[in-house]
Image: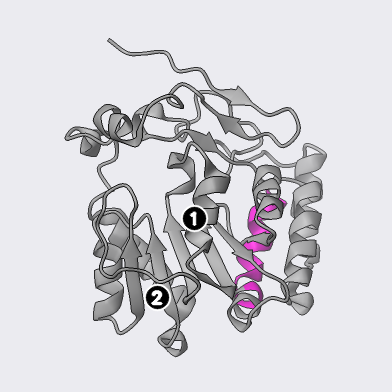
Amino acid sequence: MGEDIAYVRCGRCGFVFTTHFDALTDAEIGIRIYNSDYHLADPDFAVARPRSSAEVLQAMLGPDRKHLRVLDYGGGNGLLTRIMRERGYLFDSYDPYFGDRTAEPEEKSYDLITAFEVFEHSRDPIGTSRDALRFAKPSGAFLASTLTLPNKADIDWWYIAPRNGHFSIFTSASLDTCARALGRRVLSLSEGFHLFYAEPPSELVRDWAAREARSARYAASIRGTGQLFRTGDALWRAGARRNAFSFRDLGRALALDFGLMRPEKP
């Protein structure tokens, strides 16, 4: 028989979360959620997702970024790191829950921290982010992947899934709140990838902001003009000043705001 899990939505930033599991220890969470049947709820976890993440990262980093030290935080079985190492990148893996790691990470030694599908699994996202960022250099960036809540989503949205361990569901506003708590800024490069960075932005951040500006603007425009202007400001601050604005994206956002275009389906 199923179990009803209540979720709450913040009236200020829209953050959706459940406190149902807060009293459990990490070991108890492992028994309840990350047990031998977890693959039934998340079949891509072990192999497919690390492989697809490796393709995304290789495309984003390019051949000229192989000198960067990268730590994959919450790296599960370490497959993503092993793939990236085979391709010549300087990667380590660290997962405080699975206990799998390819090296013992040193604090303040990494140019980039990645966290693929980690945020939504955390019962304390700000605490998790702080733990991850202790391994980053002062100028180091933090790339997190998690889907943000669509405008028209409700409790039936597929990403709100307690059996998958999805305890925390973000909005753009709640990502901003998280970034401020970390003393950083955030730029959403797409609907699913979010770059937290220190000011002034590093060369990597400026490069990504410029190269991913089109994707960032599009993802923002389908949420309306408010989100588009916030993303434009984020691109400007991250150094992508020539790519921070587009009339095409503004037209799309206005059409959505005035009901001339259907919003995306959650």
Residue at image location 73% in from the left, 27% down from the top: 11
Hey, which quadrant is residue 84 in on the image?
bottom left
User: Please, what is the three-letter code of the amino acid marked with disc 2?
Assistant: Gln
Residue 164 lies left or right of residue 17; in this view the side is left
Hey, which quadrant is residue 76 in on the image?
bottom left
At which x and y percent is residue 201? 68, 76
Residue 51's mark?
none
At which x and y percent is residue 57? 42, 70
Residue at image location 75% in from the left, 43% down from the top: 256
User: Where does label 2 land, which residue?
Assistant: 58
Magenta highlight range:
209-222
Q: Earlier in the sequence, mark 1 or mark 2?
A: 2
Residue 131's mark?
1
Quadrant (top left/top right/bottom left/bottom right) for the C terminus: top right
Q: Is residue 12 above or below residue 74?
A: above
At which x and y percent is residue 114? 45, 63
